[in-house]
Image (tube, rainbow, N blue to C red):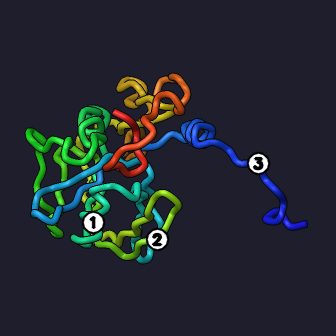
Amino acid sequence: MAAAEEPFADISACQFRWAMGHFATGVTVVTSVGEDGEPVGTTASAVSSLSLDPPLVLVCFDLESLTLRAIREHGAFVVNVLAAPQRHLSANFARRGPAVAWDGVRHRPGSTGSPRLEGALAVLECTVENNLPGGDHEIVVGRVHDVEVTSDGAAPLLYWRGSYLPLSAAASARPGRLSSHDGVVSQPLCTSLSPSSRDRGHRPPQ
């Protein structure tokens, strides 16, 4: 009998979160422009490069995400890769929908009009190439049209097993080169992650 035909026991969402929490990730804020012309954004860790030729990235969004709704309409977005000192931005953009506060968030519009956050390690400006179903999420494939990388040597913001890595640990782990992709053990993700958020990608809690 082929593996696909074998009966498998279902795992719980808690088990799945806890297992995937062992995969350390960087943290991004994905930004776009809403129907009213105002900036929108959400914290996301389910972000990955997809192709070099053409240059493509993918981002996964909760189906109820307000940022996803904006990206569908605007047709473009920016992936802002956060530095370790920008943990406050991760928390801010992990809030639900209108609760996200843009006051005091320094940013400027990119070529598509989507916001680029100041101080980000890297920004990738994208237009929507494709949208694909992914269970309770939607996979947005973006074609990268422009990139910008910081040269200040800041460490990346890292997330692992329900916590951010301490700044000192992230700093000691970073490479010495300009381009880098680089918390601590806490309680299982099933208790440290909020079960749902109305405007989230796949991302760390506040």
What residue do we see at 24% from left, 71% from top? 73
**How many numbered circles does the render carry?**
3
> How far separated are the C-alphas under marks 1 and 3?
36 Å
Per the image, the residue denoted by label 1 is 71
Q: What crowding class fits label 1: few (fewer than 14 Cα within 10 Å), some (14-19), or many (20 or more)?
A: many
Secondary element at image label 3: loop
Task: Give the label, 1 or 3, closer to the camera.
Answer: 3
Q: Amino acid at mark 3?
A: Ala
What residue do we see at 30% from left, 43% from top? 82
Q: Quadrant of residue 35?
A: bottom left
- Which tag, 1 or 3, sits closer to the chain's start? 3
The vertical placement of 114 against 88, above or below, is below
Residue 43 is situated, as x and y percent measured from the top left of the image, at: 32, 46
Front residue of 22/40: it is 40
Q: What crowding class fits label 3: few (fewer than 14 Cα within 10 Å), some (14-19), or many (20 or more)?
A: few
What residue do we see at 27% from left, 53% from top? 149
Residue 162 is situated, as x and y percent measured from the top left of the image, at: 48, 31
Per the image, the residue denoted by label 3 is 9
Residue 30 is situated, as x and y percent measured from the top left of the image, at: 29, 54
Task: Give the label, 3 or 2, closer to the camera.
Answer: 3
- Which tag, 3 or 2, sits closer to the chain's start? 3
Any part of residue 66 in sight: yes
Q: Amino acid at mark 2?
A: Leu
Front residue of 55/68: it is 68
Secondary element at image label 1: helix
- Quarter of the image containing the N terminus? bottom right
Per the image, the residue denoted by label 2 is 132
